[in-house]
């Protein structure tokens, strides 16, 4: 189904099942431990052997020798795989560094060997016996040190210019010129990267944990130089991804190579301390923002440049994209700067682009509002735009930022905020409120599905879509139930298998809208097949209560499949509506913090998100997405940081003991409000992404609240107490 003009009325608008807060249909399996995760497919292969990864002990250089003998003769060892004995390997389209390194080492903990043994413990013990000698080379590991030499945009991501920024900024009545930094961050999904590989002749099946089945499959085929049809990838349950499982990673490649070498099924799980350096991370940024306004606070000039680093061939963190669209202003300039760094590969993590971009921009806006003497909510409303500022003929399909901000201010009690910092004291606490705008673009992706109706009236949906803890199973079931006119209990959803039609996958908050739109398309075809079978006009037949009706006539839905299951398949393909409309999602984030006057400890006390993100397919699963994202924003504001060893070039705190994320005790009262925001431009579902929106802007709202509480403006994330202590108001 081609989607190239805004959706009209369709069966989804009935909202009998869609739009309702159904519990997750996969919830009971997850809470009883019967949902099978990547390392748990005990019944799918017998005689399974275990692989343990050896990660490079240097960040850059060459392996000069590798002595495998001790490892090979250790108890239980079946094989030791290295780049030297693995045969000729390709590299995945979406991988920057190779997943099995050697002799060249591109980053710390790049896999250089896999030891396969009868048991996990034997493999782990033998991995310590692999004797690797290196010649260490000097690399670039310090973004701030590289920054002065990086002044040009990457070739494929040129600067954007609207009007004349320099002229407008120099003549602006009020100006802000400030720099902000965000650190490297790690996804830290609960479930580690894990895979089990089974060969049958030249055919490979990999049970893994991956957000994008088809990307994984095609890149695995490419890496192993196999025809794609010989590779099957299965990943129905995923314990969190956050971008860290968007791509083929070393666990899957090494499980396949290990299984080939040992001639046995092989499981590989990346140990937690290997994950941050072996896989991808969110790159650190240095962001330079300049804003100029007239006397009344209207933005006349805005510029945002962002520096980030990556391995050769890697991409920049696109931290400036929201600045092109969030606020009005006739003169604008944005630019990305990419330094070559020899740290592990930087890539997508939890709303790449906008999340770190808004961490800077929304502090800058708070600072600018203060310079203009305008309340930060009012300042944002004053500078709202309903059109793409670079192309005023192109409106936003829906844009309710102002409503988000107004609703949030009212619900949060913003009028009780004291605009002068460091005035509100409660015992040992300095108390403050802060807010920020939330913005995330709404991307759409081709997505396919197959649906069956059987003689019992059961509708089964098959698509390679994934559920990374987000609720995909449930919203897909709701979509099929609405379309077929059956209760939710009559729908079976099968996900995460490359033998199903290729879906949008889970990434960039496009999954819910795109994958359900694909299911919608397949269901339109199934309805046609059912109508034809039962002798109805497909254009006028209605589907409800497990019946098909047209005028006076009705028939049981299940009868259409009485003499055999009916099957239909289709995909949603998005046209170029984005040429006419800018599609984005919006939020207002409000936060109250307390800062300990003596220690500088920051405690978040209340959080509110008001979101406008198209039709909400399931308010319960959507709310879970948003409160999880708000928690990530809290982590980003106050805790999360991969510490770079700038002498040796690696992330030092590469486990959950050293890399801090929020725990329950850190997370206060959270409230989420969804505005009614049906968007016919986004898809037949009229929905948009919401998961990543829940994060975008949160960290800045917290930092702005810390400023309001203390009068200390921190521009370097995370806001740890050492950055506050020296400047806190006197205790006595
Ligand atoms: Mo998301 S960072 O595209 O999984």
Image (cartoon, grey):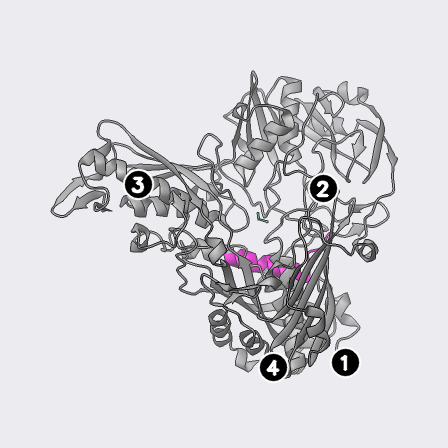
Residue of label 4: 374
Tell me what residue is drawn at x 51 percent, y 75 percent.
409
Q: Classify mark 2: helix, strand or loop.
A: loop
- Mark closer to the chain start, 3 or 4: 4
Q: Which residue is mark 2?
A: 313
Residue 633 within the segment the image draws in magenta: yes
**Occupied quadrant, residue 728:** bottom right
Asked if the residue under mark 1 is in contact with the one under mark 4, i.e. CB atoms within 8 Å, the reply is: no
Q: Relative to 506, is 218 above or below?
A: above
Q: Nearer the viewer, mark 1 or mark 3?
A: 3
Question: Is any part of residue 702 visible from this angle?
Answer: no
What's the magenta bit mostly, secondary-structure-wise? helix
Q: Secondary structure at mark 3?
A: helix
Q: Earlier in the sequence, mark 1 or mark 3?
A: 3
In this view, the residue farthest toward the left is 552
Residue holding disc 3: 490
Give the magenta part as a residue range: 626-642
Q: Tell me how far mark 4 sits from mark 2, CA to CA.
A: 44 Å
Q: Is 315 located above or below residue 200 in the figure?
A: below
């Amino acid at each position: 189904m081609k989607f190239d003009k805004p959706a009209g009325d369709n069966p989804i608008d009935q909202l009998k099942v869609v739009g309702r807060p159904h519990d997750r249909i996969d919830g009971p399996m997850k809470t009883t431990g019967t949902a099978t995760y990547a390392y748990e497919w005990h019944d799918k292969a017998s005689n399974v052997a275990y692989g343990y990864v050896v990660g490079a002990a240097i960040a850059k250089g060459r392996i000069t020798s590798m002595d495998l003998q001790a490892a090979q003769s250790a108890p239980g060892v079946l094989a030791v795989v290295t780049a030297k004995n693995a045969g000729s390997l390709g590299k995945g389209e979406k991988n920057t560094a190779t997943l099995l390194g050697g002799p060249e080492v591109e980053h710390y903990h790049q896999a250089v060997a896999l030891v396969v043994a009868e048991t996990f413990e034997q493999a782990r013990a033998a991995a310590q016996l692999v004797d690797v000698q290196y010649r260490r080379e000097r690399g670039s590991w310090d973004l701030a040190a590289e920054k002065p030499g990086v002044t040009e945009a990457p070739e494929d991501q040129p600067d954007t210019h609207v009007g004349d920024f320099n002229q407008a900024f120099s003549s602006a009545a009020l100006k802000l010129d400030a720099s902000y930094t965000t650190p490297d961050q790690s996804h830290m999904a609960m479930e580690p990267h894990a895979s089990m590989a089974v060969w049958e002749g030249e055919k490979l099946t990999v049970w893994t944990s991956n957000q994008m089945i088809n990307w994984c499959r095609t890149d695995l085929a490419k890496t192993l130089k196999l025809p794609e049809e010989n590779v099957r990838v299965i990943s129905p349950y995923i314990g969190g991804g956050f971008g860290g499982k968007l791509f083929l990673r070393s666990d899957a490649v090494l499980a396949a190579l290990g299984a080939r070498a040992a001639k046995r099924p092989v499981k590989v799980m990346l140990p937690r301390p290997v994950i941050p350096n072996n896989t991808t991370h969110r790159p650190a940024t240095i962001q330079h923002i300049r804003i100029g306004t007239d006397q009344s606070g209207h933005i006349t000039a805005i510029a945002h440049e962002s520096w980030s680093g990556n391995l050769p061939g890697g991409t920049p963190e696109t931290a400036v994209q929201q600045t092109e669209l969030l606020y009005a202003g006739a003169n604008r300039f944005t630019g990305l700067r990419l330094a070559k760094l020899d740290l592990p590969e930087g890539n997508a993590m939890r709303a790449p682009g906008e999340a770190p971009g808004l961490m800077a921009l929304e502090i800058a806006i708070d600072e600018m509002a203060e310079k203009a003497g305008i309340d930060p909510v009012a300042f944002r409303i004053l500078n709202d735009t309903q059109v793409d500022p670079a192309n005023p003929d192109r409106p936003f399909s829906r844009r309710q930022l102002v409503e988000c901000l107004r609703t949030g201010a009212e619900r949060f009690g913003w009028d009780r905020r004291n605009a002068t910092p460091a005035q509100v004291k409660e015992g040992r606490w300095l108390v403050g409120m802060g807010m920020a705008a939330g913005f995330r673009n709404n991307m759409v992706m081709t997505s396919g599905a197959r649906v069956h109706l059987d003689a019992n009236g059961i509708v089964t949906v098959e698509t390679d879509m994934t559920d990374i803890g987000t609720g995909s199973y449930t919203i897909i079931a709701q979509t099929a139930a609405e379309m077929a006119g059956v209760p939710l209990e009559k729908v079976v959803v099968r996900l995460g298998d490359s033998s199903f039609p290729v879906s949008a996958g889970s990434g960039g908050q496009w999954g819910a809208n795109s994958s359900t739109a694909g299911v919608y398309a397949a269901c339109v075809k199934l309805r046609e097949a059912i109508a034809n079978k039962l002798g109805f006009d497909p254009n006028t037949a209605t589907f409800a209560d497990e019946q098909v009706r047209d005028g006076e006539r009705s028939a049981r839905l299940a009868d259409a499949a009485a003499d055999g299951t009916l099957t239909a398949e289709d995909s949603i393909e998005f046209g170029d509506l984005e040429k006419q409309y800018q599609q984005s999602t919006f939020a207002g984030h409000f936060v109250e913090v307390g800062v300990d006057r003596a220690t500088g400890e920051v405690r978040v006390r209340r959080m509110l998100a008001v979101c406008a993100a198209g039709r909400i397919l399931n308010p319960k699963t959507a709310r879970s997405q948003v409160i999880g994202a708000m928690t990530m924003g809290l982590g980003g504001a106050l805790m999360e940081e991969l510490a770079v060893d700038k002498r040796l070039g690696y992330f030092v705190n590469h486990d959950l003991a050293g890399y801090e994320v929020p725990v329950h005790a850190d997370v206060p009262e959270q409230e989420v409000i969804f505005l009614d925001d049906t968007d016919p431009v986004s898809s037949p579902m009229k929905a948009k992404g919401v998961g990543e929106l829940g994060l975008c802007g949160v960290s800045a709202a917290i930092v702005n609240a810390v400023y309001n509480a203390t009068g200390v403006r921190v521009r370097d994330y995370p806001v740890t107490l050492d950055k506050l202590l020296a400047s806190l108001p006197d205790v006595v």
